[in-house]
Every structure is written in C-alpha cells, then in structure tokens.
Image (spheres, rainbow, N blue to C red):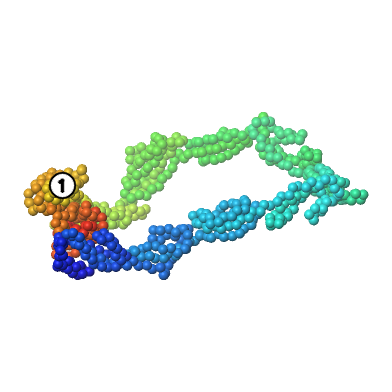
Amino acid sequence: MKKVLLSLLLAVACMPMAIGQSKASHTEITDTTVCGRFTWTVNNETYSSSTSIVVTRSDTAFFLNLNVLPATADTTTAIPVEGVCVANWNNKEWKTPGNFYDTLTATNGCDSIVKIAVSLDGYKEFNETIAVCDTFMAPWGTTYNSSTTLENDTIAATYCNYVVTMNLTVNASVVAPTTIIPEAGCTYSWQNLTINDSETYYDTLTTAAGCDSVISVQVTSYTGQSHDTVDIVACDSYVYAAGDTLTTSQMRTIQETDTTTSCEYFHHFNITIVNSHTDTTQVVVRDTIGGCSLSWLGENYTYSDTNRVIYGLGTTTLGNCDSLMAIRITAFSGINRDTTYVDNCGRYRWAVNGTTYETATLDSAISTIDGCRQIDYLSLTTHNLYDTVNERRCGSFNYVFLSRSGVAGVRDTAHYTESGTYTTDENNEPLYSKSFNTGCETYHTLILEIVPVQNRNNPDTIVATVCDAYSIVFGNENHTFESSVSDTTLIYSNRTVNRCYDTLVHLNITVNYKSVEDYHETVCNSYFWPFTEQTYTASTTEEYVLPDQTNVAGCDSIGRLNLTVNYTPDVRIDGDWHLSPDSANSTVLTAVDNAADNNTYRWYRDNATTPFSTDKSVTVSNITANTDIRLETTSDKGCSTQNWITITYNLGIDDAEGLNVNLYPNPASRYLNVESAEGISEVTIYNAIGQQVIHHSVNANATQLDLGNLATGHYTLSIRALDGSQATRKFIVNK
C-alpha cells in the first residue's frame, strides 16, 4: 500500500500542469486501516474496500491510503448461556430465554456478531384454564377470590419471571340454612339418616360446579321421649341394674320403650363411689413450742409415741362414709433441742455428760426437764497443740510455717544447715504458729536430715570462640553466654531424695560480634542495591549479610542500607507554542506543577548553555523561526527533570514542527506523559540505534506511557496527530 502511495505521490509530482493550474505546495496524507467502511472528509465519499486516492485542491494535495478490513459474523453455532433467574454474558443480562445476538471484537480489531442461546432455571410459561372452589393460590403467591383472566402478564416471584396466560373460574361453596324441625314423632328421617334425639346434624353435598356444600338440620322436641339424670353417691360400691355391682365412679344409662307410643325413655345415672376405708396418713412435725402431749381424735399422745403410726376412725365429707385415718409423729411437741458449737484448742470436756473429747466430734445427750425430754447436741472442732514435721533436703532447708503473730497471709521462716531434731529456729525462738481464724497456737517439732551436696567429678573445661553467643545444655537446662567468660560455673544441679550433687564446668569462652557497615544513600526516584539485587523506589532500611566479608574475629559483616528516595518534580509547560508572522513573535510560557512544591526553574533557548530565566513564568520574545525551549526543574531535594517544547513559527509545507507536544517528566524513570492540543493518533518510541521499542494507538489529547521495560538511555518519541501532522521529541530514561 505504501508503494502505491509513493507511486501516486511521484505521479502527482511529475504531472504536467494545465493552464491556470499551479503545482500543489502543501500535502496532507491519510494512511489508515478501518473496519467495514470509511468516509473521507476531503471529498465526503464513503469507501467499503481498500483503495489509494489523490485529490488536489488549490495548492494542497490530499492522499488517502485506505485499508478496509471486513467485519466478521458467526451465527451458525449458538453459545450456550445458563442462569437461574438471570443469565449474564459479556456484561449483559437476560431475564427471558431465547436466542440473542451480541457484538464482540475480533482479532483483527473489527466487530464480530455471535449468537447467544439463553436458558433460565425458574422461568415458566403459565398457560392454563382452571376452575376452583372459593379461592386460588397462584404459583407466584397471589390469592384470587373471584374469576379472572390474565393474559401476557409478567409477574415477579423470587426474582424469576412467569409469563402468564390464565383463565380462572372461582366457584363459591354453598352453605344451606339450618332447618328447624318442629315437634315430630319418636324418630325423624333426613338425608338417609334416622334421627331419634334432639340434636343438630350436618351433611355435605356437592354443587354442579363440583364444590362442596354444607347443610344442617336441627331436630328438637320429640313427643313421648324423655331424658332424666340421677346423681348417686355410694360408699365403696353400688348395686346397679339387677345385681350389677359397681366399685368405681361411672355413668350408666337405662333405655326403656313405651309400648303405647313406641317412644324410648332414657335414664342416665351419674354414680360416684366413695372409698370409706382409706389410709390418709398424716405426718405430724412438732417444734420446741408446746406441751409434752398431742391430742388427736379425742386421744392424748406423749413423746413416747414418737415415730409411731396411730390410727383413728373418721367420716368423709361426701356421703358420710367411714374412713380409716392415721398420723405419724416425727418430732413430738415439748421435746427441747439445744446445740452447743465449740471451737477449742486442744481437748474439751462437755459438762452435759462429763465426757472429755480430744478430737473433733458430733455427739448428743438426753435429759428430762419438767417431765419433758430435752436433747442436747455438741458440735466440737479441736485444733492440735503439737505437730511433727519430717524433712530430707540437700545442703540446707528453709522451714516455712504460719506466722507466730497470727496475722493472715504472713509466714515465718527458719533456716537449717545440719541434720537434727529442732523445736527452735536459728535464733533460738520456739517453733510455733498461731491460727488467724482460731487464735490457737501449734508447737512444731522438725526432724531434719541434711544430705551433703557433692561435686560431680572434676570440673570440665570448655574452650570456645564464637560469634554473638554461646549455648550449652546440661540436663534440661539451657545456658547461653552473650559475652566472654573465664570462670568455674555451676551448670547443673541434681537434687533428689537420695542424691545431691552439683556439676561444675570451667568455661573459657570468647564471644566475638558481627560488624555492621552502614550505607547511607540519598537518590532520586529509585536505587539499585547490588547486595540484594533489588531496586527500591521508596525510602527504607535494609540489612544483609555481606558475602565473603568477615571481620578480624571471623564473624560475618552486616551491611545496613539507610536509603532516602526523593522524587523528580512532576512538571509540564503551558502556553501558546504556535505562532505566525501575522499574529505575534512572542509568547508566555508557564511551568505547571504542584503549588506546594518548592522547585527552582531554569529556562534555556535553543542550544544555549546559560538559562535566560529562572522564573516560573517567562516571556519568550523575538521569535522569527522555530525555537526550541528546554525547562530544567529542580526540587528542594536536588532531583531534576527536563521538558522540551518547540515554538513553531511561519508554517509551510512541512508542518511537522508545528505540532504542540509536551513531554514530562524528562528524564523519566517509569512513566512518561505526552500531551498535544491537536489530538494524538499514535506514538512510537525508538532507541538510540533506531529500533522501535514502543508503539501505541491513542485517539486522545494525552496519554501516559509505561517505560518499565526500557533501560536507562536516550530515546526518540515520534508522534502523529489526529490531523495527520507529525513531530519528534528527544527524552531520557533514567533508572
């Protein structure tokens, strides 16, 4: 395509001019690839296939180099999409099943149409003719009480949809009124029932619509029929109906027939049987108040009747039947009880019975006072006055006992280093303690056996030179030394009932320490530390064991990085860069950054090495040709960035440098911002040897490029504007 375009260009350039024509002095080239079709704004023509066309107007030649890619469509095979109540695919939702079409982007960048087959669980089409009785509950939860027709109605139920077409007929059940039958004979026939008693009767019929109906009849006042009820209370039993003996309460009925009227007579007997000989034992509990006897049913009972069951004859309330009753006397009235609580030191003599007690006990004694018995109880707590303690210990023993002062929580201690029997401490004070609760004193006898402590073998000598710390384990004990030591030290003690010895070790240990080498770095944007082979983009503190580096003591060295990362300013240039002779030959440029930044600015013109201004906003005058402007911005932390722009002047056929382009930051570490008021079609980055390393289509006024895969060095940015104009800019990647 480019060869064809080149041929067209040469053809136009070599075309002889007709009379009145002049050779085109301006050229505009449109080189594009589209999907389906393209409308060229130059001649307002629409093209649906690839072509190369030249149109010349006035002094400008317009070239169209068009590549048309066809759109693709695949509707032969449907893509299955399933859901419960809603199906989701390609950021779209379907709430009804069926076949749908969607548009995707093909690999060549053109749209593709695909067919979607949507199926939904919970989706129903409800199309029925229904007849019900009284009410109808629809599947979506609505209750209908009357006939209705629903057509093409969508009703939500649990988020699923029902497409409803329903013809509903609601038939009402019929309740017939109660029929009162006046006086009749002894029986009455109704609905195939024979009724011989006053009562309300119900029956269920079925209507022509198939619904149940309830009707009732109430029959009253039968001539000649009588009912009577007789209440009978009997003791123990009752003779009923010619020798039938009843022993339990119950209801009985006798039916008789009048031979004259053929009507029936009903006699109802409500028979209650009362048991006369019932043992209603009462438990009688008496306290210390009252006399020495108890009167019950006319008889007196004394304390000698305690725990006896005494019977008497009485009568019931119902029916005056005889009943056998009984009482049990458990604590006779008039027996006094007295309990003595004693908390005593040593032994105690109880005056009630004259007995001496030396241990804690609970006892009782019985006496008679004024003809009534009295029971005395003794609850005795005693405390020992003497105790003996046996101990076997290694080397020495601290005997801890209750305080002699009797103060709660206070203990006294006696220290002994020899075997023997002791009743005093090392200060010849008696070994006794006083209870805080009772105040009783207890004298102690200590029988002590001191087992001498022996050293296990001769002390071993351990010689070691280590870094940082030395650890040694004896028995279950771990000993760690973090500094040098030369001494005989108790390492382990084995103290049992029959064995007492210490293990001594002579330690000759030299403890050396690792050395630390600090690396203090202050950088801009990022820092690569070769020890960890990592690039840091933020301030940090890291430690690393330096390989193959030991100090004079043979210990590893630690490298410690104290890193401060500052960042280059984020700056862009704002102003009018497009000048012409008939407009102006000067313009105002402004460095735009964060107002809170404390930056300094240096403006350079063309290839000058001395700045022409250090202000944030400058006026560039005497512009008679394209002029390069470079802005160097430095933060208060010493990090610098550069921005380049070209002020265009007097545009001709080659309007490439008339494109307003702003790059920042420059140098860049990770991201490069590109801006153009004319709109950006595409950008391309080339390295120092002309290789393309980045290419992006933009279609916007600004873009941000990721330079993460580029190495430190000089690069060239080529930019094509939406109007077809082009420009190139230099920038630096600094990591």
Q: Is residue 488 visible?
A: no
Q: Quadrant of the C terminus?
A: bottom left
Relative to residue 317, is residue 611 depicted above or below?
A: below
Spot occupied by residue 365 in the image (x, y as percentages of width and height): 61, 37
Front-most of 550 and 400? 550
Spot occupied by residue 547 in the image (x, y as percentages of width and height): 18, 60
| Residue sitting at x 53%, y 57% | 152
254 horizontally vs 47: left or right: right
Front-most of 352 and 583? 583
- Identity, as a three-letter code, of the amino acid under mark 1: Leu
Q: Is residue 274 visible?
A: yes
Mark 1 secondary-structure assignment: strand
Spot occupied by residue 383 in the image (x, y as percentages of width and height): 48, 39
| Residue sitting at x 75%, y 41% | 325
Q: Mark 1 — residue? A: 589
Relative to residue 406, is residue 492 depicted above or below?
A: below
Q: Quadrant of the N terminus?
A: bottom left
Query: Which residue is farthest front?
Result: 19
Front-most of 435 and 23? 23
